[in-house]
Image (cartoon, grey):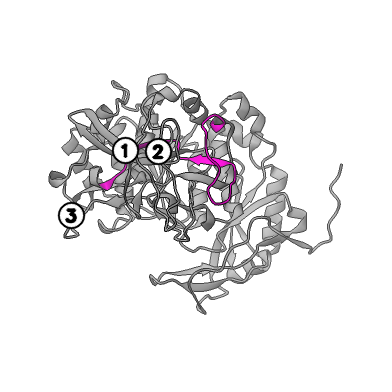
Amino acid sequence: MKKAKVAAGTYTTLAGSTKASPAAAAINTLNPNDTASVTIRIRRKKSIDTVLEKGKLISREEYAEQYGASEDDITQVEAFAAEHHLSIVQSDKGRRSVVVKGRISDLETAFKVHLTHYKDDKGVIFRGRTGDICIPAELEGVIEGVFGLDNRPHVQPHFQVAKEENGMFLAHATSPGFTPNQLNTIYKFPANVTGKNQCIGIIELGGGYRNTDLATYFSGLGIPQPSVKAVSIDGGTNSPTTASSADGEVMLDIEVAGAVAPGASIVVYFTPNTDQGFLDAITTAVHDTTNKPSVISISWGAAEVAWTTQSLNNFNEAFKAASLLGVTICVAAGDSGSDDSVGDGKVHVDFPASSPYVLACGGTKLVAKGNKVSSEVVWHEAADSATGGGVSNFFPLPSYQSKAKVPLAIDTKFKGRGVPDVAGNADPNTGYKVRVDGQNMVIGGTSAVAPLMAGLIALLNEKNGTPAGFINPKIYAATGDCRDIIKGDNITTSTHKGYKAGKGWDACTGLGVLYKL
């Protein structure tokens, strides 16, 4: 049945694009002649659900041809852009993305939005919008998301630095923390493999690394320095500054993943901290036909309530594509317990950890004697220092969690996806010994668990001779692959709502510490 013709010039609201007004002061400094880029996400040629259920993996090239955006849809979107004086920066069938660039005034006209500058309480100036994005009615269903009109800082890195009472950073010698390669032995990760011929992708929304630090760090561990490469997305670059910046996140991710799997190559995708930058980095990494990462680590996120519906859906669809490509996505579950830094007395879960197509990584407090675990409980030191975890208010309970006894969401009673799936050492007081901008430091947070699991996946991929891919159905079907954590809680809300650990899956540490597949 042919689609009914729509009158030229007719617009409709883009579903899920509603955005709240920024919590910042509006300032009139935005020049309508300034330029900006926008990423337009386009529908797939056909659904991937059936092939996903069969468990078959396909190449990135096959995916682009069979399930990427169609040439006709791309042509329609490009024609719309040209009509509004927007130039085409890039069109990518696999990523299902058309990136356009133009003057602010032309973007406002094209998408029926009003853009202005805002200044937040930290002095950061950004471009923002309020309300809906609109698109031509003939493109309804073709366009699934528009990102980049609003470039407010969007997510936070989930790492915490261990500090002494005087506020100084803990140095290696004074800390009870671990080097990542020590955890290989303590957690009984596979031996006699190094992640050879694997590529670990790392998504970073700020900060940078110094090769001199990496050389010093790995030399000190007696481990060969892994190959580390930076890829720039949307103008993001490897930009190290000081140890108190996002450099801590970047170095933590590289050094943990690299020490666990030194034989793997590491590719760091640097991007601006915006919803456009974050999504573009993920789709670029997932569909990267040059570096071909088999596992991707993400240590940035925000509570589900901070995201638009179009963001939740488009990020989730990107992770869904990764499943078909055999790419495992490891994501930090958050560092502020059941509150997830929202502060409204309700429980919240972090995204993208709440996507049903990622391996959500929670946190523990590990105490070891020699190379053996003495005790391991839920990480919970304070209201702002505890593992994230809970039940999604957006994503329904996935089939692989049907027997996990995931409770209904506490406030909404929604039958949602439970977070996390697995856990590992995250308490900064028992954290990871790393090197950042010339300083030896100890850092924790679920940010450390995501690259720890990414390193483990690289080891397993080498050992098993095949990519682990979307492992969630496997680990829920074989819970013996995890060591259960049964003590502790992540209750950090002012109303004392949250979750407790117990036998089996729980919303603090998931199935426990993963060590095999």
- Indicate which disc residue 377 carries: 1
Q: Quadrant where the C terminus lies?
A: top left
Q: Say whether residue 413 is magenta.
A: yes
The reply to whether the C-beta atoms of the residues labelled 2 and 1 are less than 8 Å apart is yes
Q: Residues within 10 Å of mark 3 (few under 14, many from 20)?
A: few
The range drawn in magenta is 401-428
In what element is the residue under mark 2?
Answer: loop
Q: How crowded is mark 1: few (under 14 residues within 10 Å), some or many (20 or more)?
A: many
Q: Which of marks 2 and 1 is nearer the N terminus?
A: 1
x then y, percent, for residue 418: 51, 40
- Indicate which disc residue 137 carries: none
In what element is the residue under mark 3?
Answer: loop
Report the residue marked by disc 2.
Answer: 501
x then y, percent, for residue 17: 63, 58
**Above or below 127: residue 266:** above
**Above or below 136: residue 214:** above
In what element is the residue under mark 1?
Answer: strand
Mark 1 vs mark 3: give the one in front: 1
Report the residue marked by disc 3.
Answer: 164
Q: Quadrant where the N terminus lies?
A: top right
